[in-house]
Amino acid sequence: MTDEIKSKDAASGSGGMETTGHVWDGIEELNTPLPRWWLWTLYACIIWAVGYMIVMPAVPFPTSDGWDYTKGLAGYSQRDVVRGEVAKSEASRAIFENRIASADLAEIRNDEDLLAVSLAGGAAAFGDNCAPCHGSGAQGFTGFPNLNDDDWIWGGSLDDIYQTIAHGIRWEEDDDTRYSEMPKFGVDEILEPADISDVVQFVLSLSASEHNAEQAVRGAVVFEDQCSACHGESGQGDRTMGAPNLNDALWLYGGDEAAITQTVTQARYGVMPAWQGRLGDATVKELALYVHALGGGE
Amino acid sequence: MSTSAAGGDGTETPSSLQSSGVPADRKGAPHRIEVDAVNAKAKRSGYAARVKIHPKRVSGRFRSIKWAVMIATLLIYYVTPWLRWTRPGDAPDQAVLIDFQTQRFYFFFIEIWPQEFYYITGLLILAAFGLFLINSVAGRIWCGYMCPQTVWTDLFIYVERFVEGDRNARLRLDKAPLSASKFIKRFIKHAVWLAIAVSTGGAWIFYFADAPTLARELVVLEAPVTAYFSMGIFTFTTYLLGGFAREQVCIYMCPWPRIQGAMFDEDSMAISYRDYRGESRGPHKAGTGWEGRGDCIDCRQCVAACPMGIDIRDGFQLECIQCALCIDACDAIMAKVGRPRGLIDYESEANLERLAKGEPRQSHILRPRTLLYAALIIGVAALMSLTLFTRSTLDANLIRDRNPVFVRLSDGSVRNGFTVRAINKLHETRQLTISITGLEGAIMTRGATHGSPDDLTIVVGPDATKAEKFYVSLPRAALAGTLKGGAANLVFVIQDPVTGQTITEKTSFRGPE
């Protein structure tokens, strides 16, 4: 057949090849037959497709319980593959998780490999569990501490942070939770409004903020009587009972006159859940190391 | 639909009318005309079977060049993974190695990291422009001499010829009934083909692992499954494409014949038949004169020699890979009949026209197209060499914290966090010092988690990267005077005190507006 269409008539524009008769700008379209093997390739693909549908999961069909699908002879399932991969990665992680669980925090901190694994695990756990309140960058919000800074209400050492995460703050279900309560000086009428106003001016003076000096002098007496037991003589705070340092530049609930007045009047009662039961000891350790490494750890 | 009958051109055939069941008494019925549609199905198939090609052995200057190129390219392919190159430290001593595990590409004295993959891109650009240039000057040199498909097909045809004999012997063998000798010949041929195919696939995987180690593992069946799998795929494709598909690859699968249509012009050299000299063709009897006829004696040696099975005398064709074997075949015949060589030769289309008109030949190698390609090649090559040979063995990336952008500390100062990722391309451990400049009053520290908080260095292992966190803080008193719109310029200096290499990274310090 090739001989039939391939004449040796070189004079013709198409070199003697059979054409479709289509001509554009003097260019003729040849009518070259498709190679036979190309056709076989198509058939082979069709056979492959049919075979694939039989061997692999393929055709969906409705059942009384919803949709199902043909499972295929090979019994392949992407979900099984994923489950296998997850199990494999858990097994490989378990080696580190076990070491982290059995090591104490100082040991982990001094082991480069364990520390790297802990920080990565801690970052993931933080994103899943802590970020809703503390923010994805641990930057905190009003009432929820910024964990990047160097101001720690209950302590910023590794062990302190671990304790806080493990048992929470004012989390009544946990017997070892950190607990303290500030009196509601206004609501419970412990102090007169004028005394509150004076002591607020004194507190403002502690951190060298703008304040009324005359009121502050009177407020110092109130502070001495009512506040210094927890916040210290000079307002330096006491971490053992979670009393914030009032001298520094950082304020969990705001450092202006209105915010401090509100704090003194109705007090604050920040609550954080205990995580040990929920996340397990290894993850709590990882979280402690992660938070400690955010920049403010002591 | 149309029943064809021989010789039908409108003549009435009453007998067939009757046989088709029309009653004889229907005198007024229309007469059936014997005619076929021009595209009647019975006449032609939409598919054509491959016609097996049996290229005839030729010898001559181009065949010699092709042998030399074949030996050179095959040697490069098979031997390269076995070349050794001493490198310091733990680096592999294989001269050319694509190491996926450590993500390195080793090429003799060059070591490329994944982020430097643009060198490979540059090489591909060079290769493409090289092809364009060579194509516009001298046609499909790549296709005819260097393409793996051509080289391996040539090798497979050589084996076929060695085992089964030359063209005529192979044609006879194809037609012969199966006998013991035919079976043995076929068996030997396929066995050798498969051996070549296996070694081709085998050589390929050696580029991706230490060749001597992998070779031993392959033999004792301890190599990774992917090695056997890759080898199997390459074995199969080599055997299929070199033994069977051959010219079908060039005609139907490869895009290059189409692309080069755009690279080719009337001044490009191509394998051409000098029809002005050859026509009119016809058999020539020894001793008779050559007046009034062309030099082509229509011996069809050029067709028999062609691995693509075409007739170069039909003119420039898509199928022609320009391997020049027809030139050798024709030159041998011209020598025999006492005519000058070069009836088929490398010649440009423009020169063919000039020569046909009796004008002298002109060479136009230097023309805008070739000059542009050459300039691009030189430009890209120069740029690549410049960056390759001036690139540093020390690199660093600086990433500033963005969440939060800055942190206010209890003493009222503002702190920014930065991650310094140092990249050490030397094969020895280095200790780098990190310092800051350009920001009055700023203090750099490490977090408490770091073993020694005052240690402002990074120790980065051989041929590795290391990321470390650094904190820069600005005292409360300095804030107002320094920050403009909440930002100030800050420069990190990463230095290797041993080599003196220094990298400066400009960044900004952020604070409250």
Image (cartoon, grey):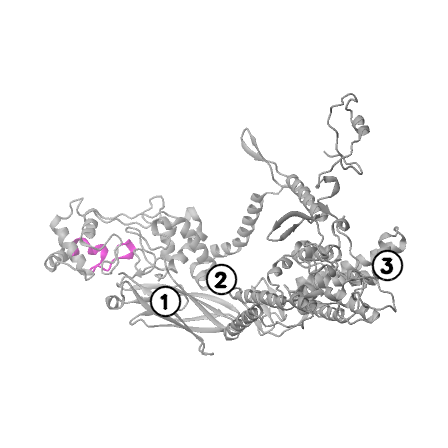
Q: Position of residue A159 (x, y in %)?
A: 38, 57
| Disc 2 residue type (three-letter) | Asp
- The magenta segment: A223-243
Residues marked 1 and 2 touching at CB (< 8 Å): no
Q: Horizontal placement of B149 versus B486: left or right?
A: right
Q: Secondary structure at mark 1?
A: strand
**Subunit bearing disc 2:** A
Instruction: Residue B169: give its label.
Output: 3
Quarter of the image for residue A214 reads bottom left
Q: On screen, B102 above or below A121?
A: below
Alpha-carbon span between mark 3 and mark 2: 71 Å
Labels 1 and 3: the sequence-earlier one: 3
Judging by the rendered image, the residue that carries numbered circle 2 is: A113
Quarter of the image for residue B105 reads bottom right
Instruction: Residue B507: give its label.
Output: 1
Circles 1 and 2 on the same chain: no
| Disc 1 residue type (three-letter) | Thr
Q: Position of residue B372 (x, y in %)?
A: 55, 69
Q: Is residue A226 magenta?
A: yes
**Subunit bearing disc 3:** B
User: Can residue B217 be spotted in the picture?
Assistant: no
Q: Dot 3 surroundings within 10 Å: few (below 14), some, or many (20 or more)?
A: few
